[in-house]
Image: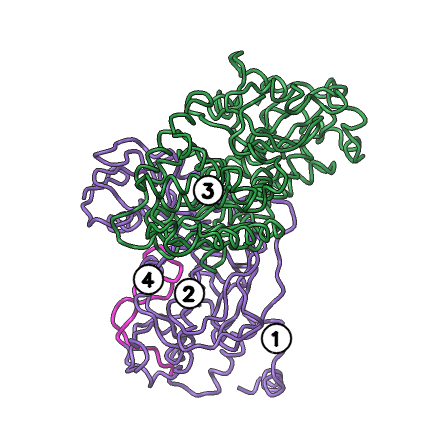
């Protein structure tokens, strides 16, 4: 069936949603999506970021739809005409949703581990306003420990339900979900449990903001200082295909491979994600490409190069470690031995 | 005296019990339908009657029934929506509490028409005593052979259960109700698929309000044609109105649709006029979610025509000068009412009841409530009125379910019709900090303080 989005025509299979059709076309017409995740069944329709204007219902019924439609859950009809970026109403609605989402989401990008990979950051950049009109108290949650692998920062959560669906569809015995309602809703465990499941790490990957982050990578590095490489290993639990985020020859983080819409290509197991931080565990395929405007593109070399191995005296690199710690975590005291080395300049 | 259909036998002592109900002609519609009508004929009668959903939306019931997927071969379900939680609406409670067998009779007849063998009444958790009344009535109906296997020897089986919700307004939305009935969190589903295709446990399901189902026995007994003769235009039949506020006779009334608002408000048969004979200031005709009407638009519409108690007449003029019949929660305000406080009160409710699934409703309802609270407590800024207007505009139509609209409309209408009061609040904070404002001095007396502005 034929569908036109922002004047661009495309033929798609029946059952395709407007968002999927827009993604086939690509470019500016692709509506932003915070809750939709093509790999998760039943996702979408919640964040209302992807609202579009259907100016012609179909060839058979050309009446426009009165309300804006969530493109991620609205199937295309033959002859449908859709306005995405070309509609003032749509742009206004996206601006509104961005404003709503930022009411309670703290703008702590400078200290958030998701900075540089945050869908809300991108949404705000494109559709947000530089000023807030919200002067009331913001929602705050007490920190909650959900285990040794995943850090939950509930203040940043935008209730996209992706992590709940991931846990529902990928893991056994889901122990977390959404509790309470309205703007008091929160992701939490039932009751004060640790999330401990072989595929639970994927919740980190699907989280569009910094609400769920990797405890093993926390505050180690800004992602744009890492060099991402595609790599794989033989794994009997998952596909073993990952992206390694490296600093020098140190693997600082392992994630699943993501496409241009920040959706993982294949989910990976916790063992690959958390337990294999040695270069020798992996077969490195080459550097990973990202979309042109991504901040992660910094330091990304797309020509086929070997991982950088700094082959020098260990003591020389000590100073570099010191600098890294000083820059990123000034409040964290140095260890006793480190202070001595630092003071004496004995490198 | 107006014609009574639903409350015809309400005053008979002991009508709550099966024996008395049966002696007064109860369960005749089940007999008639099962013994002499095909399910399709029952559906046709309901279609002919023009009965519209009494829960608020007013969708034609017969048409809704005809959408149910009969070809899939899956079991079908009828679910009665007794999750009556709209502030100002208490009609279903009255019906279930005083004539529970009428609902059960309606459920059996409707289930037969739809080909359902398993039906539910989903009742709000706060109506626990009504739940027990219904449980008891169902037990009696089972004992008398109206429920269970092989009803009246026809080979038709029906099981009926009452399910008690946990007390969430959103569970009155049909898809959230289904989710809740399935044991899940009461979040509305994305439509399509509609429940008529994939509802309870992915089976074709019809969800109807208590009052709609209770009207079915009369329609089957007296034909849809007779029912359609009552009322006016596309608003056929009778409607229960739950009246509250500053009136002499609050309560639940059954009216013939098409009755004039003036007569309903002022005749002794109904509301008997304003309490203490104070002037009428505003009216919410269909439960807290519908737009509020100012005094000059209550008896007459913007064109000067008479305002009637009907779906069409109350909505005449759109939201600029009209409202909705909604669920029939008729709330009347006299001149001592502070519209800002009233709007804040409604807004507080919708904030509390938002399920939190979609962003505009989750964040917007809370924001509106906070701004309204600030204005009401004398801490508002002039720009807050525009801000409120803007927030409600951004919520309306952009949410998964109608709760967003329900939260936005009262705010929009209050600003549209009572903007002066909002301005009074932000310009004279010291006056509004006194919690008795507008009680001691109704707004008309302080109107001169606010320069009139159009929005």
Q: Which residue is mark 1?
A: A332
Q: In the rendered structure, which segment of residues is drawn in magenta? A: A285-310
Q: Is residue A101 magenta?
A: no
Which label sits in the foreground, 2 or 4?
A: 4
Query: Distance of mark 4 from mark 3, alpha carbons?
Result: 52 Å
Q: Which residue is mark 3?
A: B27
Chain painted in purple in the figure = A
Q: Which residue is mark 4?
A: A39
Q: Position of residue A28 (x, y in %)?
A: 32, 45
* Label 4 chain ID: A
Chain painted in green in the figure = B
Q: Is residue B401 above or below residue B302?
A: below
Q: Is residue A292 magenta?
A: yes
- Examine the image and state in which quarter residue A306 appears: bottom left
Quadrant of the image for the N terminus of chain B?
top right
Secondary structure found at label 2: helix
Query: Distance of mark 3 from mark 1, alpha carbons?
Result: 78 Å
Q: Is residue B275 above or below residue A226?
A: above
Which label sits in the foreground, 1 or 4?
A: 4
Query: Distance of mark 2 from mark 4, alpha carbons?
Result: 26 Å
* Label 2 chain ID: A
Are both tags, 1 and 4, on one chain? yes
Are both tags, 4 and 3, on one chain? no
* Label 3 chain ID: B
Query: Distance of mark 1 from mark 4, alpha carbons?
Result: 39 Å
């Amino acid at each position: 069936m034929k569908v036109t989005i922002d004047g661009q025509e495309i033929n798609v299979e029946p059952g395709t949603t407007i968002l999927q059709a827009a993604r086939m076309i690509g470019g500016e017409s692709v509506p932003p999506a915070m809750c939709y995740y093509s790999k998760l069944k039943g996702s979408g329709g919640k964040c209302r970021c992807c609202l579009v204007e259907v100016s012609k219902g179909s060839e058979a019924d050309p009446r426009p739809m009165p309300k804006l439609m969530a493109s991620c859950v609205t199937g295309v009809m033959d002859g449908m005409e859709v306005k995405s970026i070309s509609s003032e109403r749509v742009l206004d609605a996206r601006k509104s949703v961005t404003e709503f989402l930022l009411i309670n989401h703290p703008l702590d990008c400078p200290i958030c581990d998701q900075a540089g990979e945050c869908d809300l950051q991108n949404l705000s950049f494109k559709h947000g306003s530089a000023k807030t009109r919200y002067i009331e108290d913001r929602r705050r949650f007490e920190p909650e420990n959900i285990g040794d692998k995943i850090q939950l920062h509930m203040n940043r959560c935008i209730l996209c339900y992706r992590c709940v669906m991931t846990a529902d569809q990928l893991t056994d015995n889901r122990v977390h979900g959404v509790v309470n309602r309205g703007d008091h809703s929160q992701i939490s465990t039932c009751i004060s449990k640790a999330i401990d499941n072989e595929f639970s790490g994927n919740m980190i990957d699907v989280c569009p903001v910094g609400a769920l982050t990797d405890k093993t990578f926390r505050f180690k590095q800004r992602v744009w200082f890492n060099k991402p490489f595609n790599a794989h290993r033989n794994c009997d639990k998952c596909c073993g295909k990952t992206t390694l985020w490296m600093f020098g020859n140190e693997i600082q983080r392992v994630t699943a491979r993501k496409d241009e819409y920040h959706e993982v290509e294949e989910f990976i197991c916790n063992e690959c994600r958390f337990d294999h931080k040695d270069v020798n565990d992996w077969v490195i395929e080459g550097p990973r490409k990202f979309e042109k405007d991504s901040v992660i593109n910094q330091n990304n070399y797309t020509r086929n190069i070997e991982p950088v191995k700094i082959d020098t005296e260990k003591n020389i690199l000590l100073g570099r470690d010191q600098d890294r710690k000083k820059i990123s975590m000034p409040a964290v005291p140095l260890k006793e031995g480190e202070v001595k080395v630092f003071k004496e300049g004995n490198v | 005296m107006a014609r009574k259909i639903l409350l015809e036998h309400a005053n008979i002592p002991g009508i709550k019990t099966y024996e008395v109900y049966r002696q007064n002609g109860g369960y005749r519609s089940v007999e008639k339908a099962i013994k002499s009508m095909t399910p399709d004929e029952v559906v046709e009668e309901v279609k002919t009657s023009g009965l519209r959903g009494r829960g608020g939306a007013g969708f034609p019931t017969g048409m809704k029934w005809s959408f149910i997927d009969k070809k899939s071969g899956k079991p079908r379900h009828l679910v009665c929506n007794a999750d009556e939680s709209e502030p100002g609406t208490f009609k279903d409670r009255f019906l279930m509490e005083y004539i529970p067998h009428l609902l059960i009779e309606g459920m059996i007849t409707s289930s037969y028409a739809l080909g359902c063998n398993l039906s539910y009444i989903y009742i709000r958790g706060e109506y626990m005593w009504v739940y027990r009344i219904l449980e008891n009535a169902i037990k009696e109906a089972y004992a008398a052979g109206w429920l269970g296997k092989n009803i009246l020897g026809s080979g038709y089986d029906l099981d009926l259960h009452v399910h008690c919700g946990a007390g969430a307004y959103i569970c009155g939305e049909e898809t959230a109700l289904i989710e809740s009935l399935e044991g899940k969190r009461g979040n509305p589903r994305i439509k399509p698929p509609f429940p008529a295709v994939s509802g309870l446990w992915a089976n074709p399901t019809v969800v109807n309000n208590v009052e709609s189902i209770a009207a079915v026995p009369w329609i089957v007994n007296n034909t849809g044609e007779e029912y359609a003769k009552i009322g006016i235009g596309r608003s056929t039949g009778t409607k229960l109105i739950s009246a509250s506020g500053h009136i002499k006779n609050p309560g639940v009334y059954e009216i013939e649709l098409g009755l004039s608002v003036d007569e309903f408000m002022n005749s002794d048969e109904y509301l008997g006029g304003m309490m203490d004979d104070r002037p009428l200031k505003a009216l919410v005709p269909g439960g807290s979610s519908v737009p509020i009407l100012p005094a000059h638009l209550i008896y007459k519409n913007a064109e000067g025509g008479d305002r009637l108690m009907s779906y069409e007449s109350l909505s005449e003029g759109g939201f600029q000068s009209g409202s909705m019949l909604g669920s029939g929660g008729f709330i009347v305000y006299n001149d001592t009412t502070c519209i800002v406080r009233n709007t804040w009160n409604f807004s507080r409710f919708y904030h509390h009841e938002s399920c939190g699934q979609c962003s505009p409703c989750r964040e917007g309802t809370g924001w509106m409530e906070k701004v309204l609270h600030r204005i009401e407590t004398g801490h508002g800024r002039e720009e807050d009125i525009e801000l409120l207007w803007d927030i409600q505009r951004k919520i309306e139509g952009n949410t998964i379910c109608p709760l967003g609209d329900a939260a936005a409309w009262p705010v929009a209408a209050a600003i549209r019709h009572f903007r002066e009061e909002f301005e009074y609040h932000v310009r004279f904070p010291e006056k509004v900090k006194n919690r008795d404002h507008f009680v001691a001095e109704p707004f008309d007396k302080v109107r001169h303080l606010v320069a009139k502005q159009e929005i």
